[in-house]
Structures are given as C-alpha cells and as structure tokens.
Image: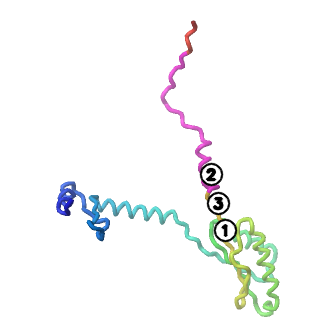
Amino acid sequence: MSAEAALNIAYDNDLDLVKISPGAKPPVCKIMDYGKFKFEQNKKEKEAKKNQHVVEIKEIRMSPVIDTNDFNVKLRNGQKFLNEGNRLKVTIRFRGRQMAHTDIGANILKRYAEACEEIAIMDKNPKLEGRHMSMFLSPKAQKPDKAKKEKAEAPASAPEPESKAEPAAEVAPAAE
C-alpha cells in the first residue's frame, strides 16, 4: 500500500500513521492512536517503578567493649533491617589502644554474623580499614517458587461466594 493511501485511511479514522521500522524496505507503518499509545506506555513504566524495591545499605556501629545488652539491641535492629530486604554494614570503631586488640572486634563481628545466619548471608568477611573493621550482610533471598505457592494456596482455600440465585430443585427419579 502506498504511504499516501495509508495516510488517507488513518486521517479518515482520526488515527495516526506511525513508522515502526523506517529502515526496512518497504518501511513498516502502523495505524494507531499515538497519544493513547504513549499514555499506556507511561502508565506501564510508572507501574514498574512502583513495584521496584530499592535496596539500601543500613549501617550499625559498635565498639570492641560493647556489653551484651547493647549487642542484643544492635542485633535486633540489624535483623529488622535485613527482614525489610536491606543490606547491612556492621562496623566496629577502634580508639587509641584498642587498635592492639583487633581480634576482639573480629570475634564480635563473627558472633553477630552467626546470630543473623538464619536470615542473612555474609557478603564480605570482617576487614580492617584504618580504625574501622566492617563486614557486609545481605538478606537471604526468599525462593520465588515458595512465595508463589503461598499466594496460590490462599485463594484456593477460601470458600467460594454463594450466588443469590436459588438453586434448582432436584428431581427424584420416578419410581416404576
């Protein structure tokens, strides 16, 4: 079909003639409402952005002389961050003569990682950088098959809604 004929058809139907692949021989065109097409495309992009989860890195700071209750508070906060799907950076800051006992800081970080091993995996082992020793934890990925099964089972177990129409009366077989 010639470009002029296609343009006339599009004009008659109040639509646009859009070139899909102008480099092809002959060029491929489509008759459509271009404004509606752009609107739908923007709507899909917004929906995709809404469903995205941005992973943040949360940081927890401790010192090598941390007490057990303070450690437990930091542990609960870290587990909460990991359950939300964020990565976690656990840092121990050494001051003055504490630099001579970096092994204590490494033991605290290992103990922290062991306490979180059910919900997280250690990305980077404890590493000393200047006066700070840090490690990274990432949440364990929930298996997508398991999540899909849970969603699929929930509606299946729900009772079906009853219709307002009365059921047809059952007819008993005639006795002979």
What residue is shown with label 1? 139
Q: Which mark is residue 59?
A: none
Q: Is residue 143 above or below residue 54?
A: above
Residue 32, picture quadrant? bottom left
Residue at horizontal 77 percent and vertical 69 percent from the top:
115
Is residue 168 on the magenta stretch? yes
What residue is shown with label 3? 143
Label 2 secondary element: helix
Q: CA distance from mark 1 to mark 2?
A: 21 Å
Q: Are marks 3 and 2 in contact (CB under 8 Å)?
A: no
Q: Is residue 127 above or below residue 114?
A: below
Residue 45, picture quadrant? bottom left
Q: Which residue is nearer to you in this view: 133 or 15? A: 15
Q: Amino acid at mark 3?
A: Lys
Q: Amino acid at mark 1?
A: Pro
Q: Residues within 10 Å of mark 1 (few under 14, many from 20)?
A: many
Q: Earlier in the sequence, mark 1 or mark 2?
A: 1
Q: Which mark is residue 149?
A: 2
Q: Position of residue 60 (x, y in %)?
A: 69, 77
Q: Is residue 168 above or below residue 8?
A: above
Residue 112, picture quadrant? bottom right
Residue at horizontal 74 percent and vertical 69 percent from the top:
116
Q: Which residue is nearer to you in this view: 154 or 69? A: 154
Label 3 secondary element: loop
Q: Position of residue 11 (x, y in %)?
A: 19, 58
Label 1 secondary element: strand
